[in-house]
Image (cartoon, rainbow, N blue to C red):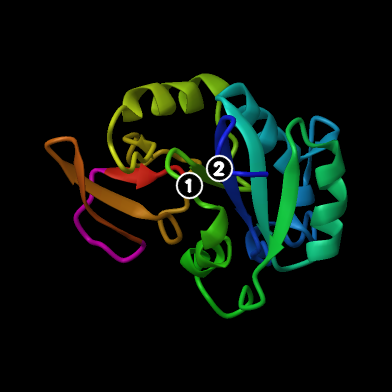
Amino acid sequence: MGGSGGRHAIVLAAGAGSRLRDREPVKPLTPVGGRPLILHVLDTLAAAGARSATVVTGHAADAVARVLTDAPIPTEPCFNPLWADTPNGVSLLAARDRVWKGSFLCMADHLLAPELAQRLVAGAGAAELALAVDRRLGHPWVDEADVTRVRTSDGLIRAIGKGIAVYDCYDTG
């Protein structure tokens, strides 16, 4: 896989998945419609134009890597040895040599419609970075204690983090 021939995706799948642990010990492998959650994420990325993907693994790395053989696009795992004690940004650093201009970045446990991913890519234009956000504050599916919050103004991200007090949307991953 190289930096040419279409967009590349980085999928963060290293965490322990503590919120779903009682249902599925490996969150990216949680069955959704009879298929692992991570394969649905890769389907969406492929529909939005990704031609290859790197999946950053950590917890249950071998089990996650095994399902990647069924991915709709060429996919390779990248192990983050620091997954247990560090935030998601460190997983992205583990794959830094696979991040190119125009790369997608998403979480292995966030489902979104392919149309949303396509709109994000189309709307990104010449911007160096584009982030999909959800402006439905107070939605019952959102865990306010754990969500990453985003403050925007003039179409730009002004602050992002779990601990910011003033925000107008949520990070969608």
Q: Quadrant of residue 154?
A: top left
Report the quarter where the N terminus lies.
top right
Q: Which residue is mark 1?
A: 100
Residue 38's place in the image compared with 82, above or below, is: above
Is 165 included in the stretch rendered in magenta? yes
Amino acid type for the residue under numbered disc 2: Gly
Q: Quadrant of residue 58?
A: bottom right
Q: Position of residue 145 (x, y in %)?
A: 42, 61
Q: Position of residue 26 (x, y in %)?
A: 77, 58
Q: Quadrant of residue 124?
A: top left
Q: Residue at x 51, y 66 (%)?
A: 93
Is 136 included in the stretch rendered in magenta? no
Structural crowding at the residue carrying mark 2, measured as other residues with C-alpha within 10 Å and reported as few (<14), some (14–19) or many (≥20): some
For the stretch drawn in magenta, the main secondary structure is loop
Residue stretch in magenta: 162-168
Between 161 and 45, the one nearer to me in the picture? 45
Mark 2: secondary structure: loop
Q: Which residue is mark 2?
A: 3
Structural crowding at the residue carrying mark 1, measured as other residues with C-alpha within 10 Å and reported as few (<14), some (14–19) or many (≥20): some
Q: Residue at x 28, y 36 (%)?
A: 127
Tag 2 near tag 1, CB within 8 Å: yes
Between 93 and 113, the one nearer to me in the picture? 93
Distance (Cα) linking label 2 and label 1: 6 Å
